[in-house]
Amino acid sequence: MTNWQELESKYYMQISPRTPLTLVRGKGARVWDDTGKEYLDFVAGWAVDSLGHCHPAVVEAVTKQVNTLIQTSNQFYTVPQLQLAQLLVTHSCLDRVYVCNSGAEANEGAVKLARRYGSLKLNGAYEVITAMNSFHGRTLMMTAATGQERFQKPYLPLPIGFKNVAYNDIKAIKDATSDQTCAVMLELIEAEGGVNVTDEGYFKEVRQWCDEKGILLILDEVQTGIGRLGTLFGYEQYGIEPDIMTLAKGLGSGVPIGAFMAKQKFCVFAPGEHGSTFGGNPLTSAAAYATVKFVIANDIASNAKKVGQYLMKALIILKDKYPFVTEVRGRGLLLAMEFSDDIGADVLNACLGKGLLVNRVKPNALRFIPPLIISEREVDEAIDILDQALSSVSQKVVK
């Protein structure tokens, strides 16, 4: 039997800290490793596999498309791309979309669009205000946008044009705003930063401030979009509308694709000012169209809301049981459990041994981001394993 982890250590760049597990097959909310062991997946490709692994609607769409037309470039019109565009616009508050390949690309495109608007309409304003503990991608510019020193420090000096301020603090945004500000870019929930949530009304205050100053509000919905919070788009729950919104992760239910959307007023790119070779290709667009169509037709967002509330209640019961669990937070099927000590890896490994995959989002916190089709029965199974894991590591916690 091939030792795949040994091959990885020999040939692959040592960048991603990996769980010692080689996955070879998936179906629904289950995956299997190369020894045949089954796991319940509450990672879902980092909130990517929105319909679970190898969902029939996605498999059928990709199989049909791979036998029809795969890649053409954006020199030509293609049907799946335009079907996806129409579906996203019809079901959102935005007017136009550009399809790309990832969340980082979507955010990069959104910032470029905001800067172009600033150049044309705001006397050359180019700065974008973002939040501390945010995460907007791994490109050099999105590293500057991401308000986390650990990501920024290795790549100094960073591109200029970003101000990282405190999250959930409207005064911080107001104090950072100047005549050089063209936009504010925020996540509705800071997912990679620890599943950080805001006070009620924060985003309405941000929206009002952007309107007062005539600057753009960009919502990074790479992780919160396509049903994860309990509505098709997360902004629907906050009583606001963005000027620009970015999507990726769950958009293709496992197939790599991203997009940024904007209201007509802000669609100021001239032909040739942005582009992508692979963006919106027929294959990935067909997968995303099938995904979003299925999510809408089957009201998958409502399942995320219902089962998310069920999962939240179960996690709170565990919090009450174990004093070292200090907080449970999140919304929909984007939830986190925080500990008083840095035992995240210990709990993860204990879950792994019992057949549950979870994500250590911080040294002292786990993130739960299962497929949106997850059932209450599967939540019960996961909670039972998590309970056992917490019990097994409880003696390691400093009293």
Image: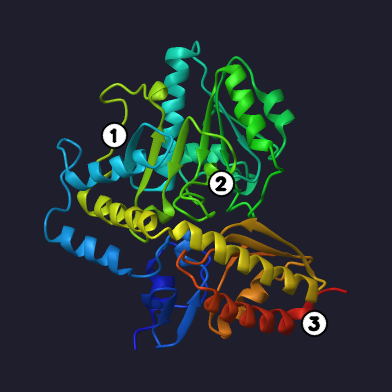
The front one of 372 and 74 is 372
Closer to the camera, 264 or 103?
A: 264
Compared to 186, does 344 lie above or below?
Answer: below
Location of the N terminus by quadrant is bottom left
- Label 2 and label 3: CA atoms lie apart by 33 Å
Of residues 60 and 301, which is closer to you in this image? Answer: 301
Amino acid on which the number 1 mark rests in the picture: Gly
Kind of residue sitting beneath label 3: Gln
- The residue labelled by disc 2 is 135
Contact check, label 2 and label 3, Cβ < 8 Å: no
* Residue 98: image location, x then y, percent: 33, 37
Is residue 363 visible to the viewer in this orientation of the structure? Answer: no
Residue on which disc 3 sits: 395
The type of residue carrying mark 2 is Phe
Location of mark 1 (residue)? 275
Identify the residue at image location x=56%, y=71%: 358
**Crowd band around label 1 with a 10 angstrom C-alpha radius: few (<14), some (14–19), many (20+):** some
Left or right: where 324 falls relative to 145: right
Q: Are marks 3 and 1 in contact (CB under 8 Å)?
A: no
Q: First in sequence: mark 3 or mark 1?
A: 1
Q: Position of residue 8 (x, y in %)?
A: 41, 71
Classify mark 3: helix, strand or loop.
helix
Q: Is mark 1 on a helix, strand or loop?
A: loop
